[in-house]
Image (spheres, rainbow, N blue to C red):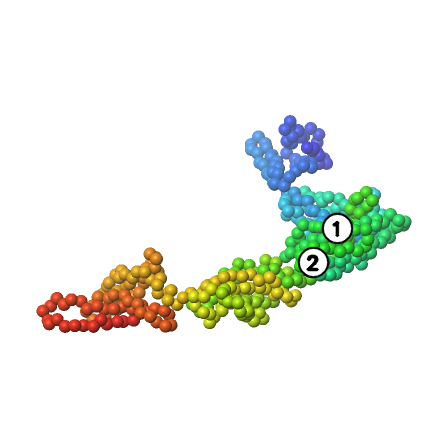
Amino acid sequence: MSVTEPSGVVENMMNINENGSVEWIGSDTFSAEVNRTNGTHGDVYGCMASNVVSNASHSFSLKVAGSPTLMLVVQISATSVIVEWSQPSGGATVTGYVVHYSHGDDNMTEDVPATSSSYIITNLTSCYSYTISVEATSEHVSGISERFTLIAGASLFVNVTAEAVSSTVISVQWDHLSACSPVSHLSEIFMVHYTAVSSGVMDKTSELIVSSTEAMLTGLTPYTNYSIKVAEVSEMGNVGPCSYPITMQSDEDVPGPVGAVTASPSPSQVTLTWEPPLMPNGIIIAYEVSYRQTASSEPETRVNSSALATNFTTESNLEEATEFIFSVRAYTRVGPGNASSLTVATLAAESIPTLIKTAVIVGIGSGAALIGIIIFGISIACIVFKRSHHRARPILYTEDNPAYGVTLGVRYKPSRRTDSSPTHTQEPVYDTIS
């Protein structure tokens, strides 16, 4: 810690205590500068003034910007360089950036807005060595990036192009030049960096070393964007300046299998639902559904694929109580992928009423009764019906119905008479309720 006296201050008007604090003696206004090269964001500093009556204090929190990270320094000509960086992940709010580039004792700076993450340095002197860094400024303390050194124009990559050869192969070509003499120092070994880019996120970078100005990138993922750049490799194995990245997409391929096929059967139809392929390998333009009876040797029945742009379908007019094998596959412009299959049995029509095991009257009120239907011990439905004008007790009955397999109804069985009127025969009366 050091303290600097403002001009006009009388000597011996301030003391520095053993703990490093500064104490002024007198009533004039004083200032002190505390140099803290190791201060961190959030550190709290304060000062206090006192006299024989009282004292007053003030404190503030130190704001230190995080350090930006240099992502790319690329020579785009013999006299210009593009610099790209990532914003600091922590620290104080960045108020701006300062791009530093120096040659010898010549230090030059360029102010850049806080919203920017790149800058092009121009008017460099060809074949001069420059050191480049980026500073993130804040209210109090700045953060500095690492430094990058290059020789302007010494190693230039131009005419970098790429072409998709197939769904898994991309070819890359480039020219390697130098604006400095002699050019015999140019390396003939290159490293090609290529990275898959998915939804703006870059995956792990792969590298390929070649001894010519072209390369074939193989084993790629179909229909995927790749960021590609070329760098020089020195005789000592050091990786030097690189080209500006270009992006190329691999070709489409047939899709992978669809996922998670599920079925919902009934006596005469089956509804299928499936998930899109995990590896689409292109743009899915349609799905195709085919099916056949498990015991049949006849060709599969195929549903028109052009009509299935969604991931579900219902197949009707199927035989009841029959087992079918359903297959689903996806299409890209290249063709169909492998099918995913599922075995499904349609229901038997008579299987629906057999599920009803118990029906009980759970409550009778004035003019109405409530019936609970119990299936496998679980109450799933209640039926409310009005009491008939007949003096009878209601009893649940079922009868066949071609459309639904069963009809629920109530039969009113005559009650025994308790009066003295003559006994007569009364036939049961049926009121259908479903």
Give the class, few, some or many, for how many residues have Cα within 10 Å of label 2's Cα (few <14, many ≥20).
Answer: some
Closer-to-camera residue (403/13) = 403
Task: Quarter of the image for the C terminus: give it.
Answer: bottom left
Which residue appears at 65% of the width and 54% of the height?
A: 201
- The quarter of the picture where residue 197 lies is bottom right
The image shows a total of numbered marks equal to 2
Left or right: where 317 falls relative to 228: left
Amino acid type at mark 1:
Leu
Left or right: where 188 falls relative to 9: right
Front position among marks 2 and 1: 2
Q: Residue placed farthest to the right in the image?
A: 182
Closer-to-camera residue (65/393) = 393
Amino acid type at mark 2:
Thr
Q: Is residue 231 visible?
A: no
Which residue appears at 29% of the width and 66% of the height?
A: 384
Q: Residue placed farthest to the top in the image?
A: 18
Which residue appears at 54% of the width and 61% of the height?
A: 341
- The quarter of the picture where residue 161 lies is bottom right
Instruction: Name the residue tied to disc 1.
Output: 208
Closer-to-camera residue (374/197) = 374
Q: Where residue 72 appears, x then y in whole percent?
A: 74, 50
Left or right: where 161 falls relative to 429: right
- Above or below residue 230? Residue 60 is above
Residue 168 circle label: 2
Residue 360 circle label: none
Which residue appears at 77% of the width and 45% of the height?
A: 148
- Above or below residue 5? Residue 99 is below
Q: Where residue 312 appears, x then y in whole percent?
A: 52, 65
- SS at mark 2 in the image: loop
Left or right: where 127 falls relative to 201: right
- Above or below residue 287? Residue 177 is above
